[in-house]
Image: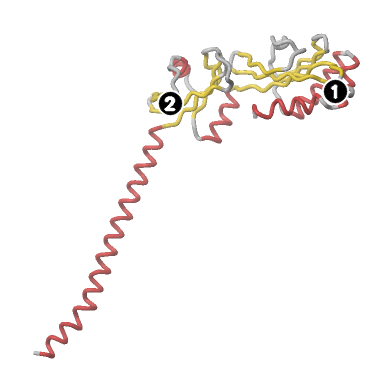
Amino acid sequence: RLGTLEVQARLLADLPTLKASVATGDPATVARLAADLRARARADMIGVASAAGRPLAWIGDDVPGFFPPAPPSEEGSIFLAEPHAVLQVVTVSILVGPDPPERLGALSLGVRLDDARVRQFEAVTDARVAFALGGRVLASSLMAESNAALEKLPETPGPLAFVVEGEEYLVARRALTAEPGGPVAFILLSRSERLAVLRSLRGALASAGIVAVALALGLSWTVARTVSHPLAELTATMR
């Protein structure tokens, strides 16, 4: 989802309807169109600014009334910490005219990594997931004490053993950007569940082995009787 955010933003920024509304400089006109574009892109927030950096629209669910700290006149991607989510905002230029094009303004598109998004990831991956920014876990399905323990985990290249609510997990820490201090995803795989699967598999293999041995013994007995009975009759005749 995050990988396609910039592509979506560039496609929206190239729409003639958006360029025409930004050219008016009227916030009400831009806001009406921005609300429709946000719904079509299924984004959590959308912002539009003029070429001078004046905000023309900022629409989103429970988004504070501020524009991204990065100047809208500059393209880029930033991550913002919200009380219970990590918000990624991508800003692209709105261009018009032939080369070299005139810069009409900027479009910002954002998605929120919150508890609802965490549950979506967990349903797909069969793992526990948490998102952190600035050393704080902001979105997860874990208890508050477990989130605090995750924040104290050392940065290592490999997975670490971690106990969550009495269950043992292997935790992998993955940075979502190459920049220091950027957002981090924690992926937790349950060792208890996987060991239970292995125990079930071992039991099934043992049962299958017992059945195989029993069948082999029965087959051997049948073959032995088939061969030994004619030999016994031949021996009696010779006597």
Q: Position of residue 16 (x, y in %)?
A: 88, 26
Residue drawn at x 60%, y 27% is 117
Identify the residue position indicated by label 2 in the image. Answer: 158
SS assignment at label 2: loop
Q: Position of residue 24 (x, y in %)?
A: 91, 15
SS assignment at label 1: helix
Q: Is residue 235 above or below residue 219?
A: below
> Which quadrant holds residue 145?
top left
Amino acid type for the residue under numbered disc 1: Leu
Q: Which mark is residue 6?
A: none
Of residue 92 and residue 22, the one placed in the foreground of this image is: 92
Amino acid type for the residue under numbered disc 2: Gly
Which of marks 2 and 1 precedes in the sequence? 1
Is 182 on the left-hand or right-hand side of 216? right
Residue drawn at x 82%, y 9% is 52
> Which quadrant holds residue 97?
top right
Q: Residues within 10 Å of mark 1 (few under 14, many from 20)?
A: some
Q: Position of residue 182 (x, y in %)?
A: 57, 16
Q: Residues within 10 Å of mark 2 (few under 14, many from 20)?
A: few
**Can you name the residue that lies furthest to the left here?**
239
Q: Which mark is residue 18?
A: 1
Do the numbered discs 1 and 2 sit on residues whose CB atoms are within 8 Å?
no
> Which quadrant holds residue 85?
top right
Q: Is residue 126 above or below residue 118?
A: below
Residue drawn at x 28%, y 56% is 210
Q: Position of residue 59 (x, y in %)?
A: 75, 17
